[in-house]
Structure formats: structure tokens, C-alpha cells
Amino acid sequence: MGKSPFSPDLTCNLGGLSWAPSMKAWHPRSCRGQPSQVCVGSLAEDCAGAWQVSTGSSLGAPLDLTDNPANLTDIMSSGNDQQSEALSKPTFSEEQASALVESVFGLKVSKVQPLPSYDDQNFHVYVSKNKDGPTEYVLKISNTKASKNPDRIEVQNDIIMFLKAAGFPTSSVCRAKGDNTASLVSVDSGSEIKSYLVRLLTYLPGRPIAEIPISPQLLYEIGKLAAKLDKTLQKFHHPKLSSLHRKNFIWNLKNVPLLEKYLYVLGQNRNREIVEHVIHLFKEEVMTKLSHFRECINHGDLNDHNILIESSKSASGNAEYQVSGILDFDDMSYGYYVFELAITIMYMMIESKNPIQVGGHVLAGFESITPLTGVEKGALFLLVCSRFCQSLVMAAYSCQLYPENRDYFMVTAKTGWKHLQQMFDMGQKAVEEIWFETAKSYESGISM
């Protein structure tokens, strides 16, 4: 059996590390069980390199990581039969996260702060300066379901590094002590063992676009960035690239009809009527045309919090903004160029005071790199509406599961329902006229 890129060389037999709260550290422990007790699902081949976290270690008081476990539901369907598979969101403490960074990546941590995340767990990590290296990182702990697909996480890491080498402002992926880009942590709560893949990325500077008024020029540049990213990834090759064919991934725009399972969270109101109508139109007008769209790998989540910007002074003394970071590649999957454009337009509309005008500027930037075909352009309006539906329905669903995280989940909903209703009321023809005329104005050098 070949060595997995996720199997660290720091283990003790089939065991790993035991958490000792009193010593604030992970310590080697031998594994009393069989490999099947340490490994979960498809991670069995990585068993020899699993890190085992014992919450009942004799080195300290029991530490229960599975209190109130977070269970999101992802649709896993086969044909017409649908069954749900729960995923468990990590619930590591700041103290445990700090100790993980020191034990797995060999960095001396000075401070750890939690970062928001939808169904994984992220920490902003500060380290003591070491050999002129970075002093800020992001520790990413994948949920149990994502952790069962190490191939996909390996591809994500390699894409991040590939894009950085191509000049995109992405993070650097840090290697663990065993020269791996991710490590498996198995948490034994006594009744069950849960496994999580952990990664460490460099922290990127800048502010989220959501925090500033977005100018037409910046919207144009973001559209251009989205197209360049997808076009560049056409040159990316990897033996495990098929892991990005995520057939029933709820966030892939192709899977808008899967939202029907979650519509009950909306109750009976106009919002639900609009979503039901969009799904109906999607089935009739998009599903039948997918074979005419040009396929590519999508980032899939170029939202106003995943794009960072930094400002500089122009010759006139005004602030000019440049993209300084692209975050969160966890939603990557095979899709289409027009999907990436629609997703980007939708998220750039969220904070805009003139949301309908946004699409034309983003479209112009995108088409400066990858012009749309007539079929793709004709589907754009409905695809933007569909992404609104995905985001708004899933946010409402997540709020029912985790009301304590309502503020985070409902960021889009604050303006999203209003924007979707406005698009619905104006109609496709009127919105397209604004978008296409605005985009056309860039061709003559006079942007609207």
C-alpha cells in the first residue's frame, strides 16, 4: 500500500495522540483497538497514520468533544431514491486547536481565534516568528463527511498551490512535520470515533469586499477574475480530479431541484412561491440546455466574504482597490463557465445599493476573458435567481438546526429576498436589458 499524503509520520503504532487538558498538549498513546475502530469509512487506508484523540485519557480529566454534536443534512440520492447522510461539524476548543497546530505542524502558537464557517471549523492562528516565515495562519478542520473524501481535499490543496504559482492571490498550503498537506485526527468520545482532516493555510491580508462600497470598476475586475480562474484551471491536471464530479452536491447550481426537500422551512408565503417557480423554470429551461454549456471547474463560492481587497492611493488621491485574496475552495466542483458568472453576480448584488445594475459590470469583466454563447447568456438571469434560491433556502434550513449561528447564516437573507423579489417582479427581459446594455457599453469604452 502506497503512502497516503494524509498519513503523518508522527504516530504511535495504530494510535496517535491523546489530549491531556492539564498539560495543554497531545501525547502519544498506543491503540488498544483494531484498525477498524480508528478509521472511518473510506479513510481506512490511512489508518496507519491516524491521529487518535482520547477524551478519556488518564493524563487529564475527560474532555467531551461530542456534546451537542452539529448535524447538517446533505442530500445523497441515487436515482429517485433519496437518503440523508449526517455530517458532524467539528467542535474543537481554542486550546485544542492551538495544541494541534503545535503538535502536527510544529509551530509555536501565541494566540488562536475562531473564524466563522458554514459546516467546517476554522481558526485564525498567530505564531511566534520563526525563520522569517509567516506569523498568521488559518487552521481548517473539515467536517466528518468531507473528511471521508481525502482525495477531494488533496485536489483542493493542489489547486490552491497551482493557482498561487499562476499568480492568483491564494494562500500557501503548509506542510505538517511528516511533509503532508493534511493530517487525520480521530476523536474517540468513548461511544464512537469521529475523524477530521486538518490543514493549515497562510492567512491572507485584506478586507472582505462586503465591507466596502463596490465600484463598477471593481465589479468588472471581479468578473474578470472569475473567468480567469476558471480558464486557468483548464490547464490543471490531477489523477484524482474526478473527485470534483460531485453529483448531488447541494451547492452545485446543477442541483437546484434538490432544494425541494428543504422548502418546508419557508412555510407558506410569497418567498416559497417564488422559489417553487424558479425551480420549475430551472427544470424546463436550464436542465434541458446543460449539454450546450461549456464545462469547467468552478470555485463555486466567490461571495463578498471570500474575496479580499486592499486599497492604495491613485494619482488623483482617491482610494483604489485591488483583490488581495481568494478564500474557501471547499465548494469546488465541476460545473460550467456560466455557473461561475451567475454565482459571482448574485453575491456581488448582496451589499449593493443598486443590485440590478451589478450584473452588467460583472458580465463585462467576465466576457473580456470568456465571452458567453447565446445559450449561456439566455440562461444567466434564471441561474442568478437559482443561486439566490440555493443560498436563501439553505440559510433558513441551517438556522433551524443552529439558531445560535443565525447572524452568520442569514447574511445573504438580509437583502437577498428583496433582491430576488425585485428580479422576479421586473422579469427576465427587463433585467437582461440592463445587464447586456451595461456590458455592451464597455466595448465602446464608455461604461455605464
Image: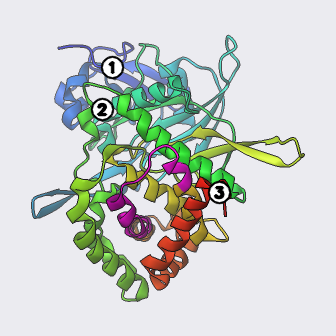
Q: Nearer the viewer, residue 34 or 286?
A: 286
- Coloured how? rainbow
- Of the two numbered discs 1 and 2 on the same chain, state the one appearing first in sequence: 1
Q: Is residue 434 above or below residue 422?
A: above
Q: Which is more toward the observer, 190 or 310?
A: 310
Q: Secondary structure at mark 3?
A: helix
Dot 1 and dot 2 residues touching (CB under 8 Å):
yes
Of the residues shown, which amino acid type is indicated by label 3? Answer: Ala
The answer to which quarter of the image holds residue 132 is top right
Please tell me whether mark 1 sits on a helix, a strand or a loop.
loop
Q: Is residue 315 left or right of residue 169?
A: right
Q: Position of residue 131 (x, y in %)?
A: 67, 10
Relative placement, left or right, of 310 versus 95 is right
The disc, 2 or 3, on the residue closer to the chain's N-terminal end is 2
Q: Residues within 10 Å of mark 3 (few under 14, many from 20)?
A: some
At label 1, which amino acid type do we have?
A: Pro
Q: Is 148 a magenta residue?
A: no
Quote the CA–CA distance across marks 1 and 2. Answer: 9 Å
Which mark, residue 5? 1
Placement of 113 over or under 373, stated as above or below: above
**Is residue 181 found left or right of 248 in the rendered image?**
right
Residue bearing mark 3: 210
Magenta part of the chain: 364-391
Residue 70: x %, y % from top left: 39, 55
At a point 56% along the width and 62% down the height, the residue shown is 360
Q: CA gap, disc 1 to disc 3?
A: 36 Å
Residue 257, above or below 27: below
Q: Could you tell me residue 305's position as x and y percent?
A: 58, 52
- The circle on residue 150 is 2
Q: Is residue 259 visible?
A: yes
Residue 326 tag number? none
